[in-house]
Amino acid sequence: MKILANDGISKSGVIALEDAGFEVITTKVAQEQVANYINTNDVAVLLVRSATKVRQDIIDACPGLKIIGRGGVGMDNIDVDYAREKGIHVINTPASSSDSVAELVFAHLFSGVRFLYDANRNMPLEGDTNFEGLKKAYANGIELRGKTLGIIGFGRIGRSVARVALGLGMRVIAADKFVGSAEIRVDFYNGQFINVDIVTEPLEDIFKHSDFITLHVPAQDGGYVIGKEQFEQLKDGVGIVNASRGGVIDEVALIDALDSGKVAFAGLDVFEDEPKPAIQVLMHPKVSLTPHIGAATLEAQDRIGTELAEQISSLLKTQNS
Ligand SMILES: O=C(O)[C@H](O)COP(=O)(O)O
């Protein structure tokens, strides 16, 4: 049986699938050619990350498709309900990348509070004499320790972020429509651990009390989580990180808030207009950018590949038995 991993898959995932008897194709097929390729090559399983869109047209055109697998969390690039109505299994790997996304959040936070994004761009070329001037420009860094981190969306990724924040000595507050409270276990290198209970709070309280805000919510149908009105409720000088989905923050309002100083910096891994961020976002000196790489670590992709292989083997075994 053939599997097309159109947005790539880790080596460990390929090995696990091949050991289970599947043929894995890792050729990148252009979006418009995916349906044709699946049919011509008798592909039974289509694996994607966020790049390939699996909409109704592909689902309708590929009656032989048995499984659509999302290597990752967000399934907004797949018409999940429609595929399931057509009898196709749709799977994802919700737990595999949480720690990687959480660590990227802190990469952006540290970058923001110590101006790394801008300092990198402005380091002197040979012959430049204004080194002291540069030192002054980046002299007003702040520490994360002791500050309040507001986590919007307290699912797996939000909780991983909380674990790191607690380890750094930050105060953590969180909001989530569906989660009332969570026990966060912080593990230390020597085997010791502590448990910390966090009770979620209304969104308005997160806006009001956070020194930094990080978002971990799915793509939204009903407007921005932080738009113009919400920016006004934030503390002056707040730092914001978004490694969830573009479209949860209003980028036009964000640029205004950065220009006015309401927001001190933003770290963005996702954009309203992905893959190409708006030019105002791209060029802004207070914005630290990454190209949607929250889950892009060797460890996360290994876990994702292996988990997909397990799920596919067990689904197809059940179906064939
Ligand atoms: O939803 C996810 O898992 C992340 O956004 C990662 O997306 P990617 O697999 O395209 O990197």
Image (cartoon, rainbow, N blue to C red):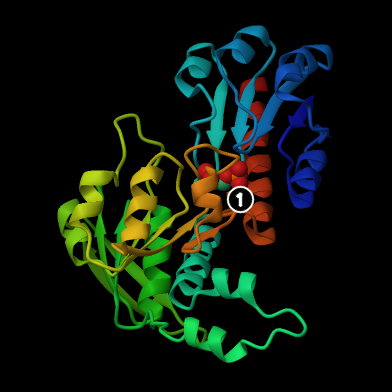
Query: In the image shown, does 315 or 100 lie closer to the viewer?
Result: 100
- Report the residue at 30% width, 82% height from top: 146
Q: Is residue 194 above or below residue 95?
A: below
Residue 288 placement (x, y as % from top left): 52, 61
Quarter of the image holding residue 145?
bottom left
Q: Which residue is mark 1?
A: 291
Q: Locate residue 256 relative to residue 110 in the image: left or right.
A: left
Mark count: 1
Residue 18 placement (x, y as % from top left): 82, 40
Q: Is residue 95 visible?
A: no
Dot 1, how many residues are within 10 Å of its Cα: few (below 14), some (14-19), or many (20+)?
A: some
Q: Is residue 102 above or below residue 222?
A: below
The quadrant of the rendering that contains the C terminus is top right
Q: Locate residue 230 relative to residue 99 in the image: left or right.
A: left
Quarter of the image holding residue 213?
bottom left
Q: Quadrant of ligand 1?
A: top right
Mark 1: amino acid: Pro
Q: Is residue 274 visible?
A: yes
The quadrant of the rendering that contains the N terminus is top right
Mark 1: secondary structure: loop
Query: In the image shown, does 62 or 44 lie closer to the viewer?
Result: 62
Q: Locate residue 301 relative to residue 270 in the image: left or right.
A: right
- Report the residue at 61% width, 8% height from top: 60
